[in-house]
Image (spheres, rainbow, N blue to C red):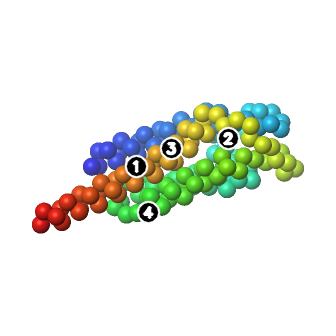
Amino acid sequence: MRNHRFIVFTLSIIIFFASLFLETFHINNGHPTAWSLGLANLILGIFSGNISWLANIFKIPPWILTYKKSGLPIVFSLIASILAFSFYINGKIIINEAGHTGKVSKYLVGYWVWFSSMTSYLIYHIVILIMERMKNKSAINFV
């Protein structure tokens, strides 16, 4: 059981860091790739005017709690996934120092890779929880 946890943990980190080197979105106003690189979004995203940047913060506890048998990784992964999806729903970003906003015109592969790093870990923890409950339930039936 620990082996697949390590594999999924490692893949989640690799997917997340891969998203940092991919373009994430284009905007209508201004230069289309001004904030597009994932690494720029990670570093400067707190100033974007979106709460979706906080998904990066909520992504860390599930990584730390990978080997803990609790519901906390699911809770933090769910929050991270919801915050990551909120960027898609909001569709706006601050584009300059004056606070003007631009509409996201296109979501690129970097956003979807970043989003999948959030949701894949959530799905993994839900599957583990279900498997553990089924295992415990079948152990009780045999006693």
Q: Nearer the viewer, mark 3 or mark 2?
A: 3
Under mark 4, the amino acid is Leu
Q: Earlier in the sequence, mark 2 or mark 1?
A: 2
Vertical placement of residue 84 versus 37, above or below: below
**Mark linked to residue 117:** 3
Residue 11 % position (x, y): 43, 40
Callout 2 secondary element: helix
Q: Which residue is mark 4?
A: 72
Q: Earlier in the sequence, mark 1 or mark 4?
A: 4
Q: Which residue is mark 1?
A: 124
Under mark 3, the amino acid is Ser
**Residue at x 80% of width, y 36% of height:** 28
Callout 4 secondary element: helix
Q: Which residue is mark 2?
A: 40
How far separated are the C-alphas under marks 2 and 1? 28 Å
Under mark 2, the amino acid is Ala
On the rendered structure, is 5 left or right of 56?
Answer: left
Q: Earlier in the sequence, mark 3 or mark 2?
A: 2
Residue 119 % position (x, y): 50, 48
Q: Are marks 3 and 2 in contact (CB under 8 Å)?
A: no
Q: Nearer the viewer, mark 1 or mark 4?
A: 1
